[in-house]
């Protein structure tokens, strides 16, 4: 190879190396270029994302050359990709929030030019307000469970998803101490308690925390007081065939929506709403001990029961003995004595003198004159004030 050819070849290699080196140097924006950033969303849930658009304009007002490299920075989360090349003076990337709440400052630069940061609020930092409610603000005093719902909204009044909400209570047991808000901005836990409890929902750190509180009230179950009085005058005791009166008294301000009494003998009765005391009469046909149950449901759907034992005795018969006190020329005087357990008092004595005549008295003694001598069977029916009956008879001859 000649000296001239060798020199030309070396020059060619040097030129090629220089061109290759230039190709690897990134194309950056010239001095005094303006970079403007816009975010698709200004608030994001934890782990949310949004587009970031950078518009890159040279000082002359024209878009920078296609392929100009723009580099992005973020104080929180990540930008994907971190570097991108312009097309018609624009570049679009995606900001992805991580698991940490806060204010993300996203910026961009190219060459010696830098944009102003765009702020994106993430998670708790985006919270405008938090509210709290319960599925029901009341539980039975015997213990119950209800759902607690906290709703998180952003500074624009929109539901905020993916925000951790802390829960605490002054009594009872929470199903969880934290929960993430869903697409409706709602985070839900449950509380089980038998006493009053204040439940607080907290969003954000100690210096920027927002809270909301609700009180869960433990209410006594509706219990209707029941008393029973029989026509015999006793309490909780009666006899077959006799009415017994039940008096049912609801607690003050109980708001009884419905009630039902079960008499324990296969019969029951709906009582409806009970704003005040009511009475019901019932007759048992068989002896025994019956458990009367009254079930009441209040306006909150809580139900309570009250029971009462009622003793029903067989309704005994009255033993009746008829005696002849005197017989003077056909004028006979009769007397009746009774035995056995008598409920109430003797109301009437129904007499049949055996000669086709009779009478009714309220006392145990009467007289009757027979027109003709002979043999007569005198019968007496005794009836008590409670309906008991007894029969007796005697034979008279003269």
Image (tube, rainbow, N blue to C red):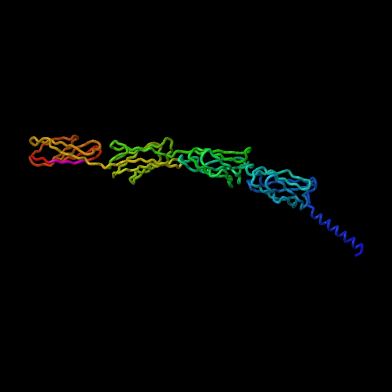
Q: Which image quarter: residue 283?
A: top left
- Magenta highlight: main SS: strand
Residue range in magenta is 389-394
Q: How many marks?
A: 0
Between residue 356 and residue 234, name the one nearer to us.
Answer: 234
Q: Tell me where residue 123 sits by quadrant.
A: top right
Residue at x 73%, y 43% (from the top left corner): 116
- Is residue 211 toward the left or the right of residue 30 in the image? left
Quarter of the figure with the N terminus: bottom right
Q: Judge left or right: residue 385 versus residue 29.
A: left
- 65 in magenta: no
Asked if the stretch drawn in magenta spans residue 393, the answer is yes
Relative to residue 323, is residue 22 depicted above or below?
below
On the image, the x and y values in percent for residue 139 come to: 48, 41
- Residue 273 is situated, as x and y percent measured from the top left of the image, at 40, 40
Q: Residue furthest right?
A: 3
Q: Position of residue 2 (x, y in %)?
A: 92, 64
- Relative to the observer, which residue lies in front, 390 or 207? 207
Q: Is residue 58 above or below residue 14?
A: above
Q: Quadrant of the C terminus?
A: top left
Q: Is residue 107 above or below residue 13?
A: above
Residue 245: x %, y % from top left: 32, 38
Which residue appears at 48% of the width and 42% of the height?
Answer: 144
Q: Is residue 356 visible?
A: no
Give the left or right position of residue 382, taking residue 273 as reference: left
| Residue 235 can be seen in this image | yes
């Amino acid at each position: 190879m000649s000296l001239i050819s060798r020199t030309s070849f070396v020059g060619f290699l040097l030129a090629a190396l220089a061109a290759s080196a230039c190709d690897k140097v990134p194309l950056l924006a010239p001095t005094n270029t303006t970079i403007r950033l816009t975010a698709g969303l200004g608030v994001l849930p934890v782990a949310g994302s949004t587009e970031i658009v950078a518009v890159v304009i040279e000082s002359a007002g024209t878009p920078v050359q296609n392929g100009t490299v723009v580099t992005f920075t973020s104080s929180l989360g990540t930008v994907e990709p971190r570097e991108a090349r312009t097309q018609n003076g624009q570049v679009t990337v995606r900001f992805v929030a991580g698991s940490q709440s806060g204010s993300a400052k996203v910026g961009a630069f190219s060459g010696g030019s830098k944009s102003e940061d765009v702020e994106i609020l993430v998670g708790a930092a985006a919270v405008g307000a938090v509210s709290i409610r319960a599925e029901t603000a009341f539980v039975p005093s015997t213990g119950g469970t209800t759902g607690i719902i906290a709703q998180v909204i952003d500074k624009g009044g929109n539901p905020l998803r993916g925000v951790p909400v802390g829960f605490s209570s002054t009594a009872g047991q929470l199903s969880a101490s934290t929960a993430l808000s869903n697409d409706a901005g709602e985070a839900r836990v449950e509380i089980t308690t038998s006493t009053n409890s204040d439940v607080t929902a907290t969003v954000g750190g100690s210096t920027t925390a927002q809270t909301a509180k609700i009180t869960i009230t433990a209410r006594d179950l509706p219990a209707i007081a029941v008393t029973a009085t029989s026509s015999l005058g006793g309490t909780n005791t009666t006899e077959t065939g006799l009415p017994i009166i039940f008096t049912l008294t609801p607690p003050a301000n109980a708001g009884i929506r419905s009630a039902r009494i079960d008499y324990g003998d296969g019969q029951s009765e709906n009582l409806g709403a009970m704003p005040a005391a009511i009475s019901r009469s019932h007759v048992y046909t068989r002896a025994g001990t019956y458990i009367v149950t009254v079930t009441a449901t209040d306006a909150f759907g809580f139900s309570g029961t009250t029971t009462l034992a009622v003793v029903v005795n067989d309704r005994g018969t009255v033993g009746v003995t008829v005696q002849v006190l005197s017989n003077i020329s056909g004028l006979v005087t009769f007397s009746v004595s009774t035995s056995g357990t008598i409920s109430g008092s003797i109301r009437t004595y129904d007499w049949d003198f055996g000669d086709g005549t009779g009478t009714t008295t309220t006392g145990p003694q009467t007289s009757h004159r027979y027109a003709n001598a002979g043999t007569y069977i005198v019968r007496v029916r005794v009836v008590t004030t409670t309906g008991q009956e007894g029969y007796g008879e005697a034979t008279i001859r003269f």
